[in-house]
Structure formats: structure tokens, C-alpha cells
Image (cartoon, rainbow, N blue to C red):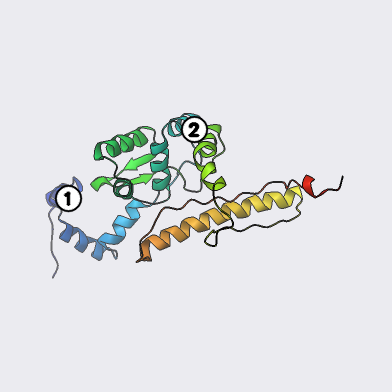
Amino acid sequence: MEERVGEATIKRWLAGRGLTLDRFDRLATLAGSSFAELVRLSERPAPGLAQELTLAQEKALSQDEFLSFLFMVILAGHRWEEILADFEVPPRQMEAALLRLERLALIDRLPGGRVRPLVDRAIVWRKTPMRALFEERMKPQFMAMDFAAEDAVYASEVVKLSSQGAAMLAELIEKHRRDVQALAEKDREVAHLPRSWHGMLCAARPLDTTGLRRN
């Protein structure tokens, strides 16, 4: 049965008044979608995302470890509520951090407390501030890893490459990072087991072979 709606009612709906979730879901169905799908679409990155941060943005993040971590996980597609629960962050601290990220033009705050990043998740960190933060806070955790442990997860290879080959290797590492992002997103949707936070490092450098040379 067709339901006719007056212009005044439509204007109220567009203004965010009087549109119930049930009616919204029915409208989405008429449009060949669903309420859940529209929510997922609203959380996707906005078009025209920034491909890199300004120096001022990186400095602000590098000066606040919690702020930088929060931005990283939002960039990776996680909800800020996960951080609130996993690390028992006081709500006032979380609100202040989200407001700071918004003022830095790093996130967009959506209705219902949802947020989405204004930066491409494939961003490459090329400036000094965030690289220095990684050197100080993340690198020691990888260096302290027991690579001889049976449960250690890593891969290592020795290859001989031209400068062109080394550049192609860098592209492969970046592709691997994007693949890991996709894996984490899929795992978030389908996993039934508890999840914990993991850090991943992929690196390549010229090999120091001085110890292999005979005197």
C-alpha cells in the first residue's frame, strides 16, 4: 500500500526531526539499501582525503602519545569506543582527544558519536615528527622481541637487488601493509574469538656483510 507524505513532513525529516529508525529503514529499503548498509557507508572515508599530514599536524600528534595512537586506530577503521573500553580511558579524556583531532582536521565527527578519518589510510609517514615518535616508542618493542621463540611471527630473506629492485621492494612492503589492513578489517567483521592489539613492522636495508669478509 502506497503511503503519501507531505512536503512539510519531508522537510522535518531532512532537518532531523520525526524520522524514526523504523521509517528510515523502510525508506532505505525503497531505495534498494538498508539502514545497516547506510551506516557502513557513512563510516567509510570521505572522498578527496588528504594524502599526507601537514608538519603542524604531525608535530601535534607526536607530542601526545595517546592522541597519535587514537588517530592511528581510527585511521585503521576501529571505533574509538574500543580504545575507551580496552584501555579504560576516562570519557572526559576521550572526548578531549576526539575534539583535538577534529580541530586538527584529522577526523570528521558524525551523528551518534561516530567518527571517520579525513586522511587516506594508505598514508606514508615521511616527515620527521612521527618517524621520531616511532623511533622512540615503537622500535624498542620490536627490538626487544625474542626472534628465537617458537611463537615469534616474522619472515626474513636475503636478496641482491639493483636500485630499481630496491624501489620495487619498497612498493611490495607498502602493498603488504594495505593487505594487512584489509585482513584486519575482515577479521573485525567475522572473528568470533577475542582480539588483541598487534604491531607489525616490515623493513628492508642494505646488509652489513663486514663480518663475513676475511681479514
Q: Nearer the viewer, residue 145 or 185?
A: 145
Query: Circle 1 — which element?
Result: helix
| Whole-percent x, y for residue 151 in the image | 52, 61
Residue 46 in view: no
Which residue is at 39% across, 51% downward?
A: 77
| Whole-percent x, y for residue 169 in the image | 66, 53
Q: How many residues crowd mark 2 within 10 Å: few (<14), some (14–19), many (20+)?
A: few
Q: Nearer the viewer, residue 15 or 112?
A: 112
Q: Give above or below for 189 relative to 202.
A: below
| Whole-percent x, y for residue 173 in the image | 60, 53
- Which of the 4 image quarters holds residue 63? top left
In the figure, is residue 8 to the left or right of 162? left
Which residue is at 38% across, 59% downward?
A: 195
Residue 22 in view: yes
Q: How many residues crowd mark 1 within 10 Å: few (<14), some (14–19), many (20+)?
A: some
Looking at the image, is mark 2 or mark 1 nearer the viewer? 2
What is the spatial separation of the Cα atoms under label 2 and label 1, in whole angstroms?
38 Å
In the figure, is residue 124 to the left or right of 70? right
The kind of residue on which mark 1 rests is Trp
Q: Give above or below for 110 relative to 3.
A: above
The kind of residue on which mark 2 rests is Thr
Tally of numbered tags = 2
| Whole-percent x, y for residue 120 in the image | 47, 46
Q: Which residue is mark 1?
A: 13
Label 2 or label 1, whichever comes before in sequence order: 1
Say the numbered circle drawn on residue 54: 2
Q: Quadrant of the C terminus?
A: top right
Q: Nearer the viewer, residue 202 or 13?
A: 202
Residue furthest bottom in the image: 1
Which residue is at 46% across, 33% downward?
A: 62
Q: Quadrant of the N terminus?
A: bottom left
